[in-house]
Image (tube, grey):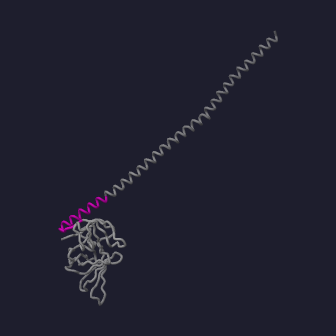
Amino acid sequence: MERRHKKNFFFTCLMVVVIFFIFESNSWFKTGESFIRKNIATHVEKSSYNLGNSFFNFINYRKIATDNTNLKNDLAKLSLDYVKLNNLITENDYLRKELSFLHEKKYDYVMVNVIGKQPFNDQILILDKGTNDGLSVNQPVTVGQGIIVGKIINVEKDRSWLELLTSPDGKLAVSLAQINGTAGLLTGQIGNNLLMEQISQDREVKENDLVITSGLEEKIPRGLVVGYVNQVESLAGQIFKQARILPAITYQNLQILTVIKGF
């Protein structure tokens, strides 16, 4: 009987230990679960969140970069359109003033465009009109309301060649605005300069005097502007004196010109 009682006591103690172990194991499990949740799971969630943010940030960056490129392209197009608009406004204003001048002078004229230069000679320009539009050799070519830049030297049906006043081969009868008749002969010089030669020694010529076409040449009216006297050179014992002339404009980048066909 005593042995049985001891056996029951031992079994009871064993059950208590087992129950205690189960409760303690459950507590450890909860503790482990809590640890995992607080540390590993939190880290995973944080990493996932950061990865998601990085992905969306990348998408946003691509979108921002694309928008930025589009904005730059739009700005470039607007800038180009603005330049074109300004050019059109400037050209329209030029043409309006030019036509007003030509009508006032009652010149027979034709507008031409420069389409090129003669190879190896930048003193000769190629124009887009010719005999079909009434152009002929020795007609004056002007710009800016009566400023002469040269003469036609060769003509075909649909194009012609303009020799600038600065060409060493060019000649033009000129005068001073304050006198009648011819005062000298204009020739071109190397370096885009102009020289007025064969001026009589008794002819008064001063710096800043306005030089114009004399009207002596058949196809060229009097009064087209050439430039201004820059320097007078007179050598003792010479029959004639000469003067350096400053052109009224620079002859670079000429585009729209006027050929005077009659007056």
Magenta stretch?
86-110
Image height of 79 relative to 98, above or below: above
Residue 222 locus on image (x, y percent) = 20, 75
Quarter of the view holding residue 183: bottom left
Furthest residue toward bottom = 237
Give x and y (percent) for residue 144. 26, 67
In the image, is 18 to the left or to the right of 122? right
Q: Please tell me which residue is depicted at 29% across the width and 88% down the height of the picture.
A: 238
Q: Position of residue 124 (x, y in %)?
A: 32, 72
Q: How many marks?
A: 0
Drawn side of residue 73 relative to residue 157, left or right: right
Residue that lies at the very extreme toward the front in this rendered image: 157
Q: Nearer the viewer, residue 232 or 259?
A: 259
Image quarter for residue 86?
bottom left
Q: In the image, residue 54 lies at what x, y percent? A: 52, 42
Residue 52 located within the stretch drawn in magenta? no
Considering only vertical position in the picture, is 104 above or below 62?
below
> In the picture, residue 119 is in which quadrant?
bottom left
Give the main secondary structure of the magenta stretch: helix
Q: Residue furthest right?
A: 2
**Which quadrant of the figure contains the N terminus?**
top right
Quadrant into which the C terminus falls: bottom left
Q: Is residue 97 magenta?
A: yes
Outermost top residue: 1
At x 41% / y 49%, what residue is drawn? 70
Left or right of residue 48: residue 211: left
Location of residue 160 with respect to 205 vertically, above or below: above
